[in-house]
Amino acid sequence: MYDPSVTGLKEFIQLDWGVSDQAWTVLAYTSVFLCSVLCTFIVVATTKHHREFTGDRPAGIQKIHQSVTPRIGGLGIYLALFFAVPLIGSGHKLLHGLLLAALPAFIAGFVEDLTGRINPQVRLAATICSGLLACLLTGYHLTMSSVLILSTVLSVYWLSVIFTALSVAGVANAFNIVDGYNGLTGFSTLLLMTGLGTIAHHANDFQVASLCVVIGCGTAGFLVFNWPRGKIFLGDGGAYLLGFTAGFIAVMLVERNESVSPFSALLVCIYPITEVIFSVLRRRSRQMSPSRPDKFHLHSLLGRRLIMRRFAHLSGVTRNSVTGVFMAMLSLPSTLVAPFIYHSAMGCLSAITLFVVFYTCVYRYLVKFRSQYSPSYQSTFNQDSVKILRSK
């Protein structure tokens, strides 16, 4: 009889049925993907019964879709990941702790998806709480840095835990900020997990590598319905879930492997982190609250000022999805480079600097971009450009 306190489900079935490690690995990852597909399909297929509560309506400063769409895609991913806990062998304790710690952030985001009444400060507090729980449940928190002053701070346990929680919360909120187009956060997550997983594999940390594959499989199942047709959105709950897991997996990767520079994890996650830093600075310079939404994110500018013109012959949903893929590709360079320089702090810092310079140049180009719009839109367009330039 299967006793989870004695062995994992993987070991039990392998001993009883004689399944090889390779066959079980393929079966486990495929099962997570299919579970995510099934859960997401159920949500999409039953939309008419719950759209009053789960539907994201095409109204608001950051809304670019054209019909009521369920925004609880994170639910299918979370259920699929929980389904994966007994399937991944020795890494099940890490995944279980990670999912339990993610609950405050996920629930806060999920309730916001249903009600729209959870203010940003409460959601930020929930993501910080998840970061603290993850440190306590897994025992991992940042203790080393290539920066001398920061290393001194991290040598104090409670300061280290607080710093880790704030860092992970920052990544979680960064994912929520970039979640603006079909496939953007989903494909970005796949690229981030590929980068972190590859580094973990090079460092012979196969448990963390397995976690990355599992989260990638759960995300891929959601993308089946999110991209390119936009049948379901990730929602705040899903964005917080993926951002939190990515952030804390980066923490575990660095802490479990001395050969991995802390800056390599920062490099892999640099796109969403850069976006959130730019957003805060931009809103502060315009005397706005950092939590107040606006339409001047890089992905918003790309979609409205470039994709809309270049692909005007396509439907709105297709332009939405094209923008999402274009923006997700910003995570590709760091994913490709990080596995080769993960041991070098200077190499990672150089790559981070190059990315920030590139991001800034692209942003300024889109701010100054001129196109042939209707007179009424051109007026609004120019006013927006002036506002952004003044805020830079």
Image: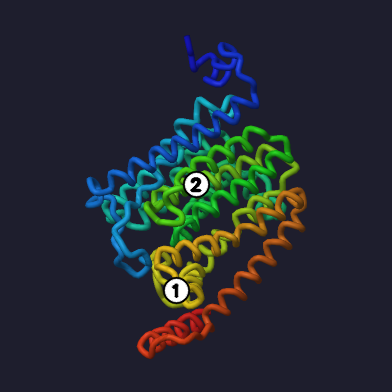
Q: Return the x and y of residue 351 as percentages of the image width and height.
A: 71, 61
Work out whether 75 lies above or below 358. above
Badge count: 2
Residue with the mark numbered 2 = 244
Q: Return the x and y of residue 99 as percentages of the image width and height.
A: 46, 36
Residue shown at 66%/33% (left/top)? 206
Q: Nearer the viewer, residue 281 or 90?
A: 90
Q: Nearer the viewer, residue 218 or 78?
A: 218
Q: Nearer the viewer, residue 107 or 40?
A: 40
Disc 1 marks a residue whose amino acid type is His
Residue shown at 53%/83% (left/top)? 369
Disc 2 marks a residue whose amino acid type is Phe
Q: Return the x and y of residue 14 as percentages of the image width and height.
A: 59, 17
Work out whether 10 lies above or below 68. above
Q: Return the x and y of residue 336 as percentages of the image width and height.
A: 69, 54
Residue shown at 51%/45% (left/top)? 220
Q: Tell me where residue 230 sits by quadrant.
A: bottom left
Residue 211 is tagged as none
Q: Is residue 387 visible?
A: yes
Work out whether 390 lies above or below 348. below
The first of marks 2 and 1 along the sequence is 2
Residue with the mark numbered 1 = 313
